[in-house]
Image (cartoon, rainbow, N blue to C red):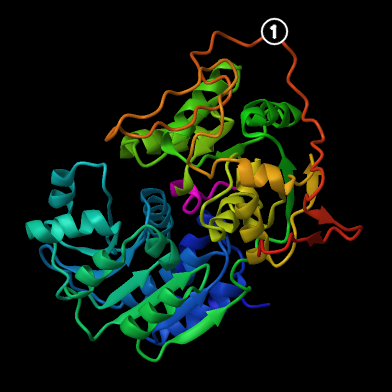
Amino acid sequence: MTTFADLGLSPKLLKALPDTGFTTPTPIQAQAIPHVMQGRDLMGLAQTGTGKTAAFGLPLLHRLLDITHPPGPRNVRALIMAPTRELVQQIYEHLFTFTKGTPCKITMVVGGASINKQVDRLAKGTDVLIATPGRLIDLLDRGAVSLEKCGYLVLDEADHMLDMGFIHALRTIAKHIPLKRQTLLFSATMPKDIEEIAATYLRDPVRVQVSPPGKPADKIVQGVHFTPQGDKARLLETYLQKHPGEAAIVFSRTKHGADKLAKLLVGWGFSAGAIHGNRSQNQRERTLAEFREGSLAVLVATDVAARGIDIPLVRHVYNYDMPNVPENYVHRIGRTARAGAEGAAVAFCAPAEMEELMAVEKVLKKPIPVIGGAPWAMEMVKAAPKPGQNRGRPQGGRPQAAAKPGAKPQSARPQGAGKPQGKPAAKPVQAKAVQGGQGAPKRNAGGQQRRPAGRG
C-alpha cells in the first residue's frame, strides 16, 4: 500500500498530516502528487470528496518549502483559484494545517469580506494566495497584489467556475501571471470548455482520472420521490422527522426560496439555517460553523454550497428543487458519504421538473430508483410551468397578480412559507403515490425507465 512517505513529501508536511486525518493517499493523491512534484502541468479529473485539495496542495507546498527567502511586498508565489467562498475557506483550512511549523504563509481573499483588511494582509506578500476570481481582480485593480513572480497556478473546480461565468475573469487574471509557470487544473466533469481551457493554459499536461466524470460516490443511496410542488415542504418535514438529529443539507433553486424554506422549518421546530450568495461572508461562515458543530441539524442552500462543504457528518441530502445544470446533482449529493462514510440522497420531482430529472439520469447513465409517487403523466408535464415560473399557489397563499412591466419577478414561496406561528397541530401529510396515468413514463421490473418519445 502506498503511503505519503513513499511519495517523497517533505518530512515537515508529513509531520502535520496526522492532525488532518489523512492516513493513506486516496487514488487521486497517489497519482497526482508525483507528477506535480516533478513540475509537470496536470489535469485532474475526480468526483467531489476524493481528496483533490491534498492532491495539489501537498506537492505544491513541498516545492515552496525549498525556497528560503520571503516572497517580497505584495508578491505571490502560488495562486489557487476556486469559484466559491466556501471552497476557498476549505482549501485554506487544509493548507493552513499542512503548513503548521513551517515558514510558509497562506492567505485567502474572498468577496463579502473587508477588502481593506485583505490589502493589509497582502502588503508583506504571501507564499500561497487562495482567492475567488472577482475579489482577486478587485485587488489587482487596486495594485494591492502582484502576480509577476507567481510560478504556480491552480484552478480548482474549473467546471464550476465556467458555470458561474468566471471565464472572462480567468482570462484577465492569467494575463498577470508569467507564461513560465506550473499550472494545475482540477475538475469533476470535462465539458468542451474545460478542454479548451486546458489547451490554452496548460503545457503538455499529464491527465489523471480516478473515476468517470459524473459518477457519484458509491456509498450514496439515491432515490426520487414524485410529488406536487406545493407538497414538497410537508414531504421534507416527513423525511426529516424520520432521521431526527442527523445532519442534512437541503438544496433550493433560489436564494429567496432557501430563506423561506429555512424559516418555515424553524417554525416547525427544526434547527435550520440558510446559506446563499446574498449572505455576507461572516453570515455564511457562522452558519456553516453552527452546522459543522451540530447546533444546526438542517442546512438549506443554493448551488453555491454544492461544492466546498466538507462535513463528514452529513448523512442526508435532499434535492428540494431539481438542479438546472444536471452535473450539479452529482456535486450536491457528494456532500454526503464523505471520506468513505455512507449517505442518502432524495430528489423531489414535481411535474415541471421531469426534464431536469431525465437530464440528471442521462449524466448518471442510469435511472434513479423511485421511492415515492410515480412518474408524471405527459399531459401534466406539458401543462406545468417551467422551473423558475410560478408553479401554482402555495398552501394558504393567494394567487399572484400579473406582474407589471419592468417589475422584478417574485420567487415561488414554499408551501406554508408565511410567518410561522409554531408547529401546526395537524399531522404531517404523508406523500401519496401519485399515479402518472396514461402517457406517463414507465419503469420496467429492472428499474429501467422507458422514455416517452421525443423526450431525450
Q: Quadrant of the C terminus?
A: bottom right
Give the camera-side residue of 155 and 123. 155
Q: Is residue 302 above or below residue 64?
A: above
Give the camera-side residue of 372 and 239. 372
Task: State yes or no: residue 307 in magenta.
Answer: yes
**Residue 110 left/right relative to 41:** left
Label 1 belongs to which residue?
A: 425
Give the camera-side residue of 239 and 442. 442
Q: Residue 432 placed where, x, y %?
A: 80, 31
Residue drawn at the location 32% of the way across and 81% of the way down = 201
Provide the major secondary structure of the magenta segment: loop
Task: State yes or no: residue 297 in magenta.
Answer: no
Indicate the quadrant where residue 250 lies. Answer: top right
Indicate the quadrant where residue 352 lies. Answer: top right
**Residue 67 left/right relative to 52:** left
- Is disc 1 placed on a helix, strand or loop? loop
Q: Is residue 278 above or below residue 13?
A: above
**Image: magenta residue range:** 304-317
Q: Amino acid at mark 1?
A: Ala
Residue drawn at the location 29% of the way across and 76% of the way down = 152
The answer to whether residue 177 is seen in the rendering is yes
Residue drawn at the location 73% of the way across and 41% of the way down = 225
Q: Residue 404 placed where, x, y %?
A: 31, 29
Give the camera-side residue of 375 and 367. 375
